[in-house]
Image (cartoon, rainbow, N blue to C red):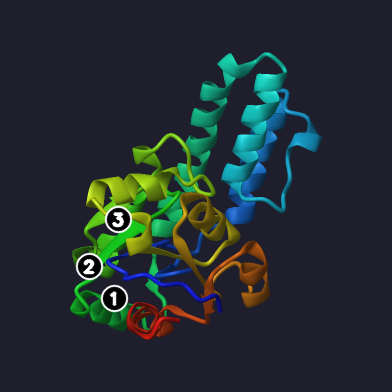
Amino acid sequence: MTSIMLTVKVVLLDLDGTVVKLKYRYIDAKAEVFNMLKLNGVPDYVLDSKLSLYENLERVKNYMESAGEAYRYEQILNISLKIAEKYEFEAASNPELLEGAYEALMRLKNMKLKLAIITNNCFKATELILSKLKIGKFFELIVARDDVKAMKPSPEPIKYALLKLNLRECEAVVVGDSTIDVKAALKAGVTSIGIASGVATREVLREAGANYVINGIRELPKLIEDISYGGL
């Protein structure tokens, strides 16, 4: 663990793999987007299956700009997000809370903390998930991809949330299960808590630069207390 002095006022949480478990067919979604991109002239070497969909879209943007085809990117992006949206709504139809999530959210609220969701999913699918699981009441704010021009690992969603909540970087922590959450937090200058309950292992999250790593959301309230009052 890294020694950091801060007083936490807001917890910015990723959704899938952090708070909830979704049957999201990531591999199928990425494969469909990749196929569409290739049909639209994007070379194989631009795409990397090891990276997230949104990191790949950023690579496509850079490629198109360097090839003098920046004008085509907006259309390509919109088609890609429409494909992603289809899979997001499919996953949102049957969400599950991760073990201990409800109790952890309740405890965090009892600690007088603000909670916000920071997700790369679309707003409507996110809202549906929160409604089905009856946890929307816990969150002051939802930042979905509809709200920003760039998605995680860009720091823009985090900066947008802090602006909306009128809080500073030193008053926030970002909690997520993937390296894109950690990368976004680092770029935004916000403390990152990796949660090894989703796509990344503890080792991968540490290597990405997470300030802290926990096994699941059940451990989060105690860690926040330790950070704020124990000087961890």
Q: Secondary structure at mark 2?
A: helix
Give the residue number, with chain letter if any, for mark 2. Answer: 138
Expressed as whole percent of the image width and height from the top left, the position of residue 89 reads 41, 51
The numbered mark, 3 or 1, whose residue comes first in the sequence reads: 1
The residue positioned 34% from the left and 44% from the top of the image is 160
Q: CA distance from mark 2 to mark 3?
A: 15 Å
**Contact (CB < 8 A) between labels 2 and 1?**
yes
Expressed as whole percent of the image width and height from the top left, the position of residue 50 reads 72, 53
Q: Amino acid type of disc 3?
A: Leu
**Which label sits on residue 128?**
3
Q: Amino acid type of disc 1?
A: Leu
Q: Secondary structure at mark 3?
A: helix
User: Alpha-carbon neighbours of circle 1 within 10 Å: few (<14), some, or many (≥20)?
Assistant: many
Q: CA distance from mark 2 to mark 1?
A: 7 Å
User: Alpha-carbon neighbours of circle 3 within 10 Å: few (<14), some, or many (≥20)?
Assistant: some
Foreground disc of the pair 3, 1: 1
Give the residue number, with chain letter if any, for mark 1. Answer: 105
**Which label sits on residue 9?**
none
Expressed as whole percent of the image width and height from the top left, the position of residue 64 reads 67, 22
Compared with 83, 5 (above or below) is below
Compared with 188, 194 (above or below) is below
